[in-house]
Amino acid sequence: MYKLDIHSNKETVDQALYQLDVAIKLAKKEKDKILELVVGYGSSGGTHKIRTAVIEKLDEYKEKKKIKGYISGSDIDFGAKHIEFLKIAPEFYNLEKSANKGVIYVKC
């Protein structure tokens, strides 16, 4: 799994979205199935702006079939969103991850 932290260096939203695009391309090139994005969750440091922009971009990428799907750490609870994500990423079922609200997992 490829991991990218796009909030710890006080990135701007534009920088974060650029890093997201590069990370998706790299994950596909390296044939990684899951990309772990650390985007932050709180309102300190503007991480909520990065998180919101990343989710909007991921929705766009999913619609354009650039990614297969994604799930926020706050949705890892075996609820509806989690079950839907497992349908496209069954290998994620075996990952022992805590529900970190500041992380988004992307199926490339």
Image (cartoon, helix red, strand yellow):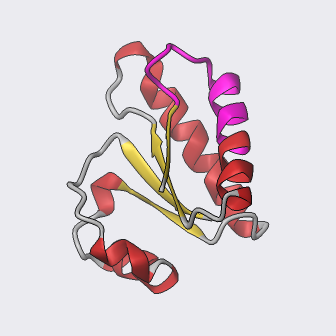
Residues 19 and 77: in front is 19
Residue 103, image quadrant? top left
Q: How many marks?
A: 0
Q: Which residues are magenta?
A: 6-21
Residue 47 vs residue 22, the one in the foreground:
22
Q: Is residue 61 magenta?
A: no
Name the residue located 79 percent from the left edge and 66 percent from the top edge. Answer: 64
Q: Could you tell whether 9 is left or right of 14 in the image?
A: left
* Residue 83 picture location, percent across and down: 35, 81
Q: Does residue 20 belong to the magenta stretch? A: yes
Query: Who's the residue at 70% across and 60% down the image?
Result: 28
Against 63, residue 18 (above or below) is above
Say if 47 sits above or below 38 in the image: above
| Left or right: residue 41 compared with residue 55 | left
Q: Is residue 43 above or below residue 71?
A: above
Residue 16 location in percent, x, y? Answer: 62, 29
Residue farthest to the front, as pictured: 30
> Where, quadrant-wise, is the C terminus in this rendering?
bottom right
x and y, in percent, of residue 96 in the image: 23, 63
Residue positioned 26% across, 76% down in the render: 79
63 to 14, vertically: above or below: below
Judge left or right: residue 5 versus residue 11: left
Write down the quadrant of residue 59 in the picture.
bottom right
Q: In the displayed image of the protein, which residue is found farthest to the bottom?
A: 87
Where's residue 8, x and y in %? 43, 20
